[in-house]
Image: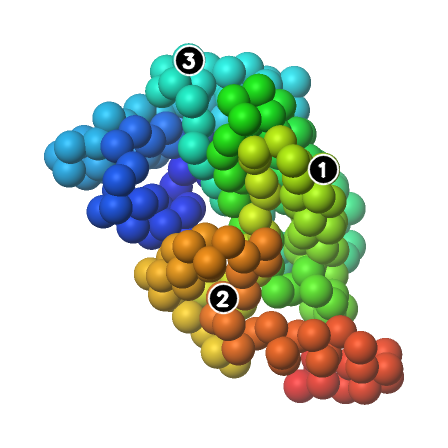
Amino acid sequence: LGGNSEIALAIVDRLVASRCKKVVLGVRSPASATTTLNRLRSAGVDADTIVFDALDPASHTKVIDAAAERMGDIDMVILAFGILDGHAEIDTDPVFAAQVVQTNFGGAVSAGLASAVQLRKQGHGTILSITSVAGVRSRAENMIYASSKAGMDSFSQALGDALIGTGARCVVVRPGFVHTHMTEGMKPAPFATTPDKIADTVINGLQKNKEIIWAPSIMMPMFLTLRHLPRFLWRKISAT
């Protein structure tokens, strides 16, 4: 879900190289995924698209049901959609701010719950929830995006707890700054990485049955420390 996400597609490529043979790309406009669809099909993958809109929660159960009907049991759902608050005036634009939160957090809740129903019914499967290290501790400069990802992260962890004993699971992925089309023109943060490197880290984490995957892994000790800094120190550090 978010089938044009460069991170998600890099993960899919690695799954396909292993044993994945069926892929459904959930996108707002199927035409936008034509190139990816053709590439997957040329690699022998049974690939298809389905219309998915994060801002239409009433449709999310139907989307998951349609994907299951098209492909059979679902082994993995990747929650990879989202909006980056890419302009400085967002704190004076409440309409856009609300759209970011409704997409990144609200959409993840409804899509995550719809996915969980299907995976519980199957008795197996993984929800891969791509959040962000930004959600570990919000900065004034990205407060809307970061808080929306914090909500998604917290929900995903709790969903994972709720799925224990069902055969299904929810794994949280916390990327740092990633060089993608979405971040073009932005100043890279320390330890900036690429979708391919993120995907390698994710696959490694899945193989080790991790519940939370930090990408790159150096982010874990760094942000677990930053999370507990006094607020006056955090303000100084985040302003630099």
Question: Residue sitting at 29 percent across and 37 percent down?
Answer: 20
**Mark 2 Cα within 10 Å, few/some/many (few <14, many 20+)?**
many
Question: Which of the pair 32/131 is nearer the observer?
Answer: 131
- Which amino acid type corresponds to the residue marked 1 in the rendered image? Ala
Question: Residue sitting at 42 percent across and 70 percent down?
Answer: 193
* 238 left or right of 228 in image: left
Q: Nearer the viewer, mark 2 or mark 1?
A: 1
Rendered image: mark on residue 215? 2
Q: In x, y percent, where is residue 81?
A: 52, 42
Q: CA distance from mark 2 to mark 1?
A: 24 Å
Give the mark, 2 or 1, whose residue is nearer the N terminus.
Answer: 1
Question: Residue sitting at 40 percent across and 60 percent down?
Answer: 204
Q: In x, y percent, where is residue 13?
A: 28, 47
Give the mark, 3 or 2, whose residue is nearer the N terminus.
Answer: 3
- Which amino acid type corresponds to the residue marked 2 in the rendered image? Ala
Question: Which of the pair 38/201 is nearer the observer?
Answer: 201
Q: Which residue is mark 1?
A: 162
Which image quadrant for residue 140? bottom right
Q: Secondary structure at mark 3?
A: helix
Q: In x, y percent, where is residue 147?
A: 74, 55
Q: Which residue is mark 3?
A: 69
